[in-house]
Image: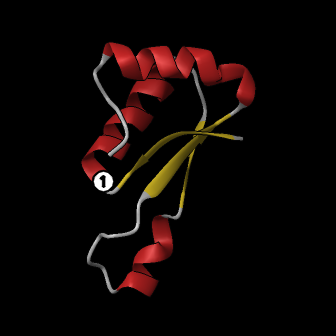
Amino acid sequence: MKELLRTTDPVKMAFATALLAGEGITAFQMDVHMSVLEGSIGILPRRLMVHPRDMFMAQAILADNEIGSD
């Protein structure tokens, strides 16, 4: 898995995941449960991972929708 997106914005993460799913690209969110360690203040970023073969297409989809990392 390769890191496609790193953000602290849960809305951006959900939107990116939905866009990729709509194009048939499987994405996996990492660090989702880190809020237990940080006290739910949202300072630790979440990462969106995709398979290396899907990386180019996934980057193009996010760029077309003007979604970038924080």
Q: Residue drawn at (47%, 74%), measured in percent from left and top?
A: 34
Report helix, strand or loop for mark 1. Answer: helix
Q: Residue drawn at (62%, 24%), measured in percent from left and top?
A: 55
Q: Is residue 65 above or below residue 30?
A: above
| Residue 49 on image: x %, y % | 60, 42
Lateral position of residue 60 relative to residue 10, left or right: right
| Residue 41 on image: x %, y % | 26, 77
Q: Residue drawn at (43%, 84%), measured in percent from left and top?
A: 36
Q: How many marks?
A: 1
Residue that label 1 marks:
10
Please name the colour scheme applied to the rendered image. Answer: secondary structure
Q: Residues within 10 Å of mark 1 (few under 14, many from 20)?
A: few
| Residue 60 on image: x %, y % | 47, 14
Please identify the residue farthest to the front as the structure is shown: 70
Which residue type does callout 1 highlight? Pro
Q: Is residue 60 above or below residue 49?
A: above
In which quadrant will I find the N terminus?
Answer: top right
Lateral position of residue 38 relative to residue 59, left or right: left
Question: Which residue is nearer to you in this view: 21 or 49?
Answer: 49
Q: Is residue 64 above or below residue 26?
A: above
Lateral position of residue 13 relative to residue 66, left or right: right
Task: Choose top left, top right, bottom left or bottom right for residue 27.
Answer: top right
Q: Residue drawn at (58%, 25%), measured in percent from left and top?
A: 25
| Residue 21 on image: x %, y % | 49, 28
Task: Choose top left, top right, bottom left or bottom right for residue 24.
Answer: top right
